[in-house]
Image (cartoon, rainbow, N blue to C red):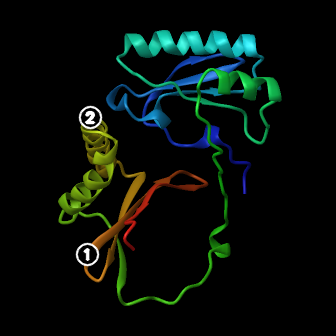
Amino acid sequence: MENISFHNLYRPGKVVCKNELFIHYYTREMKLVNDYNEIQFNRMPSIAEFILAEEYLKDFHFNHQQNHLKFCFPDNEPLYPEMINFLCCSNYGNCLMELYGIHPEQFPKIEKLPDISIQPVTDEQLQTYLAFEYEQDIKYGRGFAEEKQNQNKKNFQNEKILQLLAYYKGKPAGTVTAIISEHTVELDNLIVLESL
């Protein structure tokens, strides 16, 4: 398996700035989706470099009516104590993202369960899929949910993206998006109803 990093992940937008310190991704059609509008650092920045990147992103987002900031630090490199302190004092939240790679033959074998059915989204299922996704996305605001609907419709037309809909006892219960590239399949947007 090739070395996979967060830089390999699918983004529907474009790179608007790329330099030795960072890559800035922007998706005009999905301005409210943080994961598609962010700076990814190529190397760990000093605090002074971070502040410059932060000011750049603040200005860009202000000019594009975006009200969030998202920064991703280099893979497998812990933040140094001064950066952690700076981010905390600046009221940033943080999370640890994990990226897993697996060969197809390593997937666990499971028995087919009669109550569960997973199917590719077809023309006949598209409205069911969109309604299920909207129900999950509306928690994050109407604008976010509407942007995701538009992206889901675009993805449905993209032959390199496979949308899957899971049913439990005949009712929609979950979704996942498979993004197919030459050597990998990226699973994204995995949703399972909390009640299950």
Where is residue 170 shown, x and y percent of the image? 25, 80
| Real-space CA distance between mark 1 and mark 2, rounded to the nearest whole angstrom | 26 Å
Left or right of 158 in this view: 135: left
Q: In which quarter of the image is residue 52?
A: top right
Quarter of the figure with the N terminus: bottom right
Q: In the rendering, which numbered label is found on residue 103?
A: none
- Left or right of 43 on screen, residue 119: left
Amino acid at dot 2: Gly
Residue at 49% over, 37% down = 35
Decide if residue 26 is on the left or right side of residue 21.
Answer: left
Q: What element carries label 1?
A: strand
The answer to whether 107 is drawn above or below residue 132 in the figure is: below
Q: Tell me which numbered mark, 1 or 2, is placed earlier along the sequence.
A: 2
Question: Element at badge 2?
Answer: helix
Residue 176 appears in which quarter of the rendering?
bottom left
Q: How many marks?
A: 2
Residue 49: percent from left, percent from top: 72, 12
Density class for disc 1 (Cα within 10 Å; few <14, some 14-19, many ≥20) is few
State the image coordinates of residue 31 (x, y, percent, origin top left): 37, 28
| Mark 2 Cα-neighbour bin, 10 Å: few <14, some 14–19, many ≥20 | some
Image mark for residue 171:
1
Front one among 12 and 94: 94
Asked if the residue at tag 2 contacts the one at tag 1, i.e. Cβ–Cβ closer than 8 Å, the answer is no
* Res 62 → quadrant: top left
User: Quadrant of the image for the C terminus?
Assistant: bottom left
Say left or right for 162 vs 49.
Answer: left
Three-letter residue code for mark 1 = Lys
Q: Residue at x 21, y 56 (%)?
A: 131
Q: Residue furthest front?
A: 89
Q: Where is residue 25 in the image (x, y as percent from the top left)?
A: 51, 26
Q: Name the residue under label 2.
A: 143
